[in-house]
Each structure stands twice: as structure tokens, then as C-alpha cells.
Image (spheres, rainbow, N blue to C red):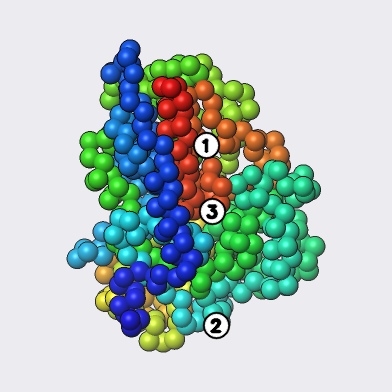
């Protein structure tokens, strides 16, 4: 099979990939089957209600359906599915992503889901030189698909990460020590040259949601642990977590799942109040009516749960965790569309990083056939006009310094500020600060009464990623089915 055919069909099926598919198939077969309803069961009460139609909620719903459960509903506040994944439609079957978009090695849950849905994947483009901006100066550097972090320091982090379970970092034997300091505190003792700080800061902000000085070292180590304790697998593009894209844009996964579920998914139905969650049946008040269910999967980020009134109030530790969960990284992402990928002809990969300025990281997000060019960017609101057109022109001006005058003439510009798009995306990445996990981590996972918590933040590995969302959906469906069968028995 030649390279082009391989890209169209998705990644080659490796031994690990085969085992991942076999494991997923076995897990589906092992799902508890729904017990027959007994006498006295109220037909007006659903077995399960799912709050949230992102990857987690829809994966849970899909598993319920495959297990034979038809008494469920998915409630989504927005007018669309996908949660923190969203596609910009570029026309003629092409898309660019406004939210989460990549998968990589070890992220078998989302890869398996894509295969099952008939969705292909293709490599992220990284070949060529990266442009770094420092004030009015800029330089191009070949980084081979990474961000140029120091190998000696990453090795130290990898060793420490082996002691930090990704799904429950607060249980690490050194949790108190690691959670008492920030990533910045640790880096400050390593005498890092100013020019080398850029790579560390870029990685911390993009993956962790905040600068190193405000990010818990314990949390950062838990993220590295998810990547098999290989730092470059977490932070790089080549052979790493940002290495593979989804054909049709990442939102296509949620769209396809929702289409298969039909009227089980109810849009524009924000949940306002949840009553009787402790003993059930649970009463769920939405903007479009009331629903009763025996069990509820809450597939939301923890801070978003604060928009729901719970009666009786949730346990104090859970309530306090949700209230204090950091919601400081809603993110803003842009896309410039060009007639050609002209930068590739110049030996550039389209990547741009600014030490100080609006561009956190710009990168080549062109379609797999490279029939036209797309430069996406994560941008800092404080350095960029809020006006759509003015922001697009300012970014194009900066791009032109690195890529050439052609960058001044995009054929289209897209700008999505998650902090302003709607009230249901408080944060795209959970920027966990020092001290948080030791105080509140133990309240993240355990079900409360008839409530089962889901969402990428609750994943045992790859928390914060699309893969983590899918894993959390599988887990929540299993918990709900087991609870339902236990009560019926």
C-alpha cells in the first residue's frame, strides 16, 4: 500500500492497534445487558438521562443503545452536538476545527471510535522550519515536529511522572510534594536560558491551559503519565498527541453518533434543576420541560455543573470542588484560508510562535490533499483586537513576516472565541493550580446518589483530551448499566 492510500484509509493497523480494536470489541460484548423491566416499573420514568451531548455523553448513549437499553435520553444545552469540538465548514467537503482536533499514540479509545464510525484519519503536517518571534525579530528553526524542549529536563519529568497515576494523581506517594509547587517553581531551579523558556511556556499554555507558574506540577506529571511517561509523546506533533487529524473535522465523530441515535438526542435543552438525585427517581427540569429518570450521567466539565441547581445540595466536598475548579482557559482559535500552501514551497511548516504577542501557536491545518492552505492559530485575547476583521488583518500581517507577502491575502478568515461563543464552554482546558488536587481530587470520580460523573476531566488516562472524553463515556455507561441492573434485580 502506498503512502497516499494509507492516508485515505487512516493509520496502518499495527499490532497495538489490532489489540486495541479487539479490546474495544470485547468490552462492548461484555457490557451488561439490560434486565427486563419488572412489575410496578413506571413507564414514564426513563432508565437513564444523559446531560451533555459532547464526546463523553454521546459515547455513553451509544454504549447504552448497543447494550439493548432504549429507555434513555441525551440532553444538550446548545443547538448542536460536539461540546468542545466544532467544525468550520470550508465548503466542498472540507473543514477546519475551532476546538479539540488531534489524536495520537496511545489514544486508542478515540481511534477505535473513529474506525467504528467509518471516519478516516491523516497525519498533521509538520515538515519544514518553524518561525519564532521575539519582539521585532524572528528566526526560523528546524525542530523536527517538536517544540525544542531540553531533553535532560524532560527525562527528569518522565522519571517523576512514573510515580503519578494519571487518573488519580492525588494518590501518588509524592502527591503532597508535587502539588505544593507549580511547574514554574520546578523549572526556575533548572537555570533555563531565556530563549529556551518559550518552548516550555508554549507547551504549558496549550496543553495545560496556563503559564508554568500557575500550573500544578502534580497535574503536569499526571498528563505526562498518560503519554506512557514520554514527554515528547505528550507535547510534540511528530509521533505524538498532536500527530493525527480526523478526516471531516473532529466534530464529525459526535455528529455521526447523534445521527445514529436520532430523537434520543434533544438539543436546545439546558438543564436548570435536578431534584431527588439522592434516592430517585431523579427529576430533571430543562428549558423545554421535565424529565424523570432512575439514573443520570452528568457528562459535563465540573465547573459547568454549577449552572445546575441540585436539590438536595450536593455533598460539600463535591460542591466545593466544582465551585473552585479552574475555568480560566476558554481559548480563542482562528483560521486563515489561502488558495495554496505556499509556505511549504519555501521549506516552512507554517508554524509560528511568539514570545510576546497574540500568537501562542500557529500551524498548518490544511486538508490532507493540500488542495488549498489553512493556517490555524491559538491566540491570546489580550494581544489581539476583539473585532473580527481587525484581528484577521493583524494576524495576516504577522504571518506575512514569517511566510511571505502571500499571507496578506487570505480568501477566508474564521475566528472562534470560546469565552464568548456561549455560556456552556467555561474552559477548554483545565488549568489545575498548585494545591487543588490534594484538597478536592478525591471528589472528582465517585458517583453521588443516582448521579454518575463523566466528561474528559474524569478519564483515567488522557484526561482533557478527546480520547479521555470517549473513555469516560464508556466508563459511565458501564456504571449506569450495572446500577440499573442491580436495582432491578
Q: Residue at x 39, y 65 (%)?
A: 245
Q: Which residue is mark 2?
A: 142
What SS does tag 2 mark?
loop
Using the rendered image of the protein, determine whether residue 246 is visible from the camera's viewpoint: yes
Pick the front one: 93 or 9: 9
Which of the image's four quarters has the N terminus?
bottom left
Q: Residue at x 52, y 23 (%)?
A: 449
Residue 12 sits above or below residue 52 on the image: below
Instruction: Determine the CA span between mark 3 and mark 2.
Output: 28 Å
Q: Which of label 1 and label 2 is nearer to you?
A: 1
Apparent side of residue 484 relative to residue 214 in the rendered image (left or right):
left
Image x and y of residue 425, in percent? 43, 42
Q: Residue at x 32, y 31 (%)?
A: 72
Pick the front one: 43 or 79: 43
Image quadrant assignment for residue 70? top left
Which of the image's four quarters has the C terminus?
top left
Apparent side of residue 165 relative to residue 467 in the rendered image (left or right):
right
Image x and y of residue 169, in percent? 67, 47
What SS does tag 1 mark?
helix
Image x and y of residue 434, in percent? 70, 46
Instruction: Determine the CA span between mark 3 and mark 1.
Output: 16 Å
Q: Earlier in the sequence, mark 1 or mark 2?
A: 2
What SS does tag 3 mark?
loop
Q: Earlier in the sequence, mark 3 or mark 2?
A: 2
Q: Which of label 3 and label 2 is nearer to you?
A: 3
Q: Which residue is mark 3?
A: 462
Q: Does the residue at mark 3 contact the one at mark 2 (Cβ under 8 Å)?
A: no
Q: Does the residue at mark 3 contact the one at mark 1 (Cβ under 8 Å)?
A: no
Of all residues, the one furthest to the top in this rendering is: 40
Image x and y of residue 340, in percent? 30, 78
Q: Earlier in the sequence, mark 3 or mark 1?
A: 1
Q: Which residue is mark 1?
A: 302
Amino acid at each position: 500500500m502506498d503512502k497516499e492510500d494509507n492516508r485515505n484509509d487512516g493509520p496502518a493497523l499495527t499490532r497495538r492497534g489490532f489489540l486495541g480494536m479487539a479490546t474495544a470489541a470485547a468490552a462492548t460484548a461484555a457490557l451488561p445487558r439490560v434486565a427486563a423491566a419488572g412489575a410496578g416499573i413506571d413507564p414514564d420514568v426513563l432508565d437513564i438521562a444523559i446531560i451533555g451531548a459532547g464526546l463523553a455523553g454521546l459515547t455513553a448513549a451509544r454504549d447504552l443503545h448497543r447494550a439493548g437499553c432504549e429507555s434513555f435520553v441525551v440532553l444538550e444545552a446548545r443547538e448542536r452536538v460536539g461540546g468542545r469540538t466544532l467544525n468550520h465548514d470550508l465548503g466542498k467537503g472540507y473543514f477546519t476545527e475551532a476546538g479539540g482536533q488531534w489524536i495520537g499514540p496511545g489514544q486508542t479509545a478515540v481511534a477505535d471510535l473513529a474506525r467504528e464510525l467509518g471516519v478516516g484519519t491523516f497525519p498533521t503536517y509538520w515538515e519544514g522550519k518553524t518561525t519564532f518571534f521575539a519582539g521585532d525579530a524572528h528566526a526560523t528553526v528546524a525542530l523536527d515536529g517538536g517544540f525544542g524542549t531540553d531533553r535532560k529536563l524532560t527525562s527528569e519529568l518522565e522519571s517523576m511522572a512514573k510515580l503519578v497515576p494519571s487518573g488519580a494523581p492525588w494518590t501518588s506517594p509524592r502527591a503532597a510534594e508535587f502539588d505544593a509547587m507549580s511547574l514554574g517553581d520546578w523549572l526556575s531551579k533548572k537555570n533555563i536560558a531565556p530563549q529556551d523558556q518559550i518552548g516550555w511556556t508554549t507547551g504549558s499554555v496549550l496543553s495545560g491551559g496556563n503559564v508554568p507558574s500557575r500550573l500544578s506540577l502534580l497535574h503536569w506529571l499526571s498528563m505526562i503519565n498518560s503519554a506512557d511517561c514520554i514527554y515528547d509523546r505528550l507535547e510534540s506533533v511528530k509521533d505524538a498527541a498532536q500527530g493525527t487529524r480526523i478526516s471531516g473535522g473532529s466534530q464529525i465523530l459526535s455528529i455521526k453518533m447523534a445521527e445514529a441515535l436520532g430523537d434520543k438526542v434533544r438539543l436546545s435543552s439546558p438543564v436548570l434543576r435536578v431534584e431527588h438525585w439522592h434516592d430517585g427517581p431523579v427529576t430533571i427540569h430543562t428549558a423545554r420541560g421535565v424529565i424523570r429518570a432512575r439514573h443520570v450521567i452528568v457528562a459535563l466539565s465540573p465547573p459547568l455543573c454549577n449552572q445546575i441547581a441540585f436539590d438536595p445540595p450536593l455533598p460539600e466536598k463535591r460542591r466545593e470542588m466544582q465551585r473552585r475548579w479552574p475555568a480560566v482557559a476558554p481559548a480563542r482559535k482562528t483560521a486563515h484560508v489561502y488558495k495554496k500552501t505556499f509556505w511549504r514551497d519555501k521549506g516552512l511548516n507554517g508554524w509560528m510562535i511568539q514570545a510576546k504577542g497574540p500568537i501562542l501557536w500557529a500551524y498548518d491545518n490544511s486538508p490532507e490533499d493540500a488542495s488549498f492552505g489553512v493556517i490555524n492559530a491559538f491566540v491570546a485575547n489580550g494581544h489581539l483586537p476583539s473585532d473580527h476583521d481587525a484581528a484577521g488583518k493583524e494576524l495576516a500581517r504577522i504571518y506575512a513576516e514569517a511566510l511571505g507577502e502571500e499571507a496578506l491575502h487570505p480568501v477566508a478568515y474564521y475566528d472562534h472565541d470560546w469565552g464568548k461563543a456561549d455560556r456552556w464552554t467555561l474552559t477548554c482546558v483545565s488549568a489545575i493550580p498548585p494545591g487543588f488536587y490534594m484538597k478536592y481530587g478525591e471528589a472528582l470520580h465517585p458517583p453521588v446518589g443516582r448521579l454518575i460523573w463523566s466528561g474528559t476531566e474524569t478519564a483515567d488516562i488522557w484526561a482533557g483530551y478527546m480520547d479521555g472524553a470517549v473513555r469516560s463515556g464508556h466508563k459511565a455507561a458501564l456504571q449506569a448499566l450495572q446500577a440499573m441492573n442491580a436495582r432491578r434485580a
